[in-house]
Image (spheres, rainbow, N blue to C red):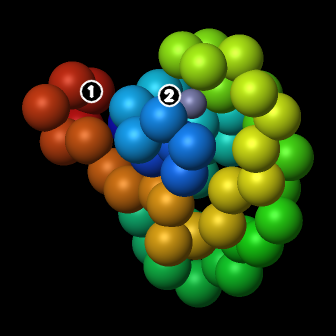
Amino acid sequence: MLMVKCPKCKKSFTSPIQLDEVSFRSSRIENNEAKCPNCKQEILIGQEDMYFDKGFNQ
Ligand SMILES: [Zn+2]
């Protein structure tokens, strides 16, 4: 499961973009607009804000 750490509230949520790890490593993700479900703010997410949570499906 690909997760996003909100740069505003620092809480994590499931990424609206789901990639496998290989695709993720070979992609450049920058300035992706999203709405944080925790703080309800519009945020821009980049690759550095994303990580894989291996506790769930993978
Ligand atoms: Zn937030």
- State the residue position of label 1: 57
Element under label 1? loop
Rendered location of residue 38, percent (x, y): 54, 16
Residue at the location (76% across, 44% down)?
43
Q: Amino acid at mark 2?
A: Thr
Foreground residue among 36 and 21: 36
Q: Position of residue 9 (x, y in %)?
A: 48, 35
Q: Give left or right: position of 2 versus 7.
A: left
Describe the element under mark 2 as helix, strand or loop. Answer: strand
Residue at 86%, 46% (x, y): give it: 33
> Count of labels shown?
2
Vertical arrangement, residue 47 with respect to residue 20, above or below: below
Q: Residue at x 71, y 17 (%)?
A: 40
Closer mark to the observer between disc 2 and disc 1:
2
Give the spatial CA distance, label 2 vs label 1.
12 Å
The amino acid sitting under disc 1 is Asn
Q: Which picture quadrant has residue 26? A: bottom right
Residue 21 appears at what percent x and percent y?
A: 42, 63
Decide if residue 2 is in sight here. Answer: no
Q: Residue 32 at what x, y percent from top left?
A: 82, 56
Mark found first going from the N terminus, 2 or 1: 2
The quadrant of the rendered image in which ligand 1 is seen is: top right
Q: Quadrant of the C terminus?
A: top left
Which residue is under mark 2?
A: 14
